[in-house]
């Protein structure tokens, strides 16, 4: 994802359907203005595989749960 994002949403009800929707009212800019990245690479990369999909496994969650930080 981009280092900048919107957040802090407020709910509102659509007048006819009564569906509740959220609208963001705050833009979080967590990078400096000249940061042109369109995404930030993950620290733990777990590519999607068909084998994991077929087995109904969440490979990304498994990678996170099995992660052990290496300290020097």
Image (spheres, rainbow, N blue to C red):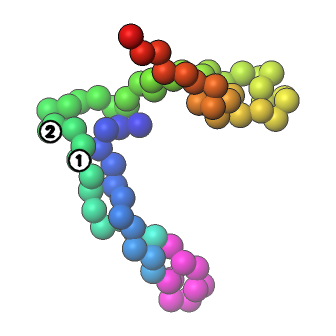
Q: Is residue 37 left or right of residue 66?
A: left
Instruction: Where is residue 69? Give x, y as percent.
Output: 48, 21
- Mark 2, Cα crowd under 10 Å, few <14 / some 14-19 / many 20+, is few
Is 20 one of the magenta-colored residues?
A: yes
The reply to whether callout 1 and callout 2 are in contact (CB within 8 Å) is yes
What kind of element bears circle 2?
Answer: loop
Secondary structure that dominates the magenta span:
loop
Residue that label 1 marks: 29
- Please say whether residue 70 is one of the residues in the magenta stretch: no
Residue 65 in picture, x, y percent from top left:
63, 31
Q: Give the residue displayed 77% in from the left and 32% down from the top.
A: 57
Let me know if residue 60 appears in the view.
no
Placement of 45 over or under 29, stated as above or below = above
Q: Nearer the viewer, residue 65 or 72?
A: 72
Q: Is residue 37 visible?
A: yes
Which span of residues is magenta-colored? 13-21
Q: Is residue 21 above or below residue 26?
A: below
Instruction: Tell me the residue that label 2 is attached to.
Output: 33
Query: How many residues crowd mark 1 within 10 Å: few (<14), some (14–19), many (20+)?
Result: few
Outermost residue on the front side: it is 72
């Amino acid at each position: 994802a981009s280092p900048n994002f919107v957040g802090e949403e407020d709910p509102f009800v659509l007048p006819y359907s009564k569906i509740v929707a959220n609208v963001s009212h705050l833009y979080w800019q967590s990078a400096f203005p000249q940061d042109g990245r369109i995404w930030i690479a993950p620290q733990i990369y777990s590519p999607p595989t068909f084998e994991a999909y077929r087995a109904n496994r969440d490979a990304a969650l498994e990678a996170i749960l099995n992660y052990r930080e290496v300290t020097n």
